[in-house]
Image (cartoon, rainbow, N blue to C red):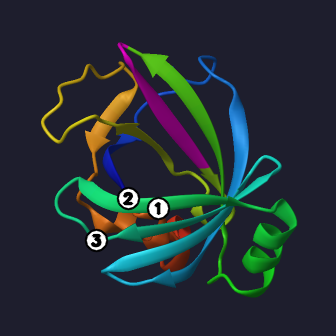
């Protein structure tokens, strides 16, 4: 079992854009409730199946397995809740950590978030200048919620 310790932030400027290489993601949920999610995703030409538990605070149990790309595509097309999330992820090394910036498309167009995985819940880290408000505990920003209530439906 792996434990994922992650914090999420909105991105407030484009200062990150030339700092890494973007990879296309498609992800959908086979099960998404408050205690667990089962996600299928494609990352470039690879497929993955991930099971996440509720956990506590910013730490959550997570199990991830590589699966054949064509099986992942079939699950996204035929089994996943709609809409399937489309985004690019850019990985950016900064001050000893890797920030992952997700730029969303489709029904979540206009949303840009960054996340950082930490070695412990109390780990300190430096934020790049393009990092904005923290949204770690806000369920609206969970990818599983973006599939159910896309960003395009939010009142701004």
Q: Secondary structure at mark 3?
A: loop
Residue depicted at 40% across the width and 64% down the height: 142
Q: Are marks 3 and 2 in contact (CB under 8 Å)?
A: no
Q: Are marks 1 and 2 in contact (CB under 8 Å)?
A: yes
User: In percent of the image, x 41 and y 60: which residue is there?
Assistant: 62
Q: Image height check: is 140 above or below 125?
A: below
Q: Quadrant of residue 22?
A: top right
User: Which percent across, then down, holds residue 139?
Assistant: 31, 67
Density class for disc 3 (Cα within 10 Å; few <14, some 14-19, many ≥20) is some
Q: CA distance from mark 3 to mark 2?
A: 14 Å
Point out the frontmost of discs 1 and 2.
2
According to the picture, the residue beneath numbered tag 3 turns out to be 54
- Location of residue 118 by image quarter: top left
Question: Which residue: 76% across, 69% down?
Answer: 72
N-terminal-most mark, 3 or 2: 2
Q: Relative to 75, does residue 4 appear above or below in the rendering?
A: above
Report which residue position mark 2 lands on.
1
């Amino acid at each position: 079992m792996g434990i994922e310790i992650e914090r999420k932030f909105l991105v407030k400027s484009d200062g990150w854009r030339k700092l890494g290489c973007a990879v296309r993601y498609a992800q959908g949920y086979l099960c998404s409730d408050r205690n667990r999610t089962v996600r299928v995703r494609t990352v470039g030409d690879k497929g993955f199946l991930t099971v996440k538990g509720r956990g506590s605070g910013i730490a959550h149990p997570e199990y991830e397995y590589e699966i054949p790309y064509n099986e992942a595509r079939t699950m996204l097309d035929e089994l996943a809740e709609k809409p399937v999330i489309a985004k690019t992820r850019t990985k950016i090394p900064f001050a000893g950590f890797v920030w992952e910036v997700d730029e969303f498309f489709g029904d979540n167009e206009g949303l840009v978030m960054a996340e950082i995985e930490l070695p412990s819940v109390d780990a300190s880290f430096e934020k790049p200048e393009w990092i904005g408000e923290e949204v770690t505990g806000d369920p609206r920003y969970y990818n599983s919620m973006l599939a159910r209530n896309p960003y395009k439906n939010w009142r701004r």
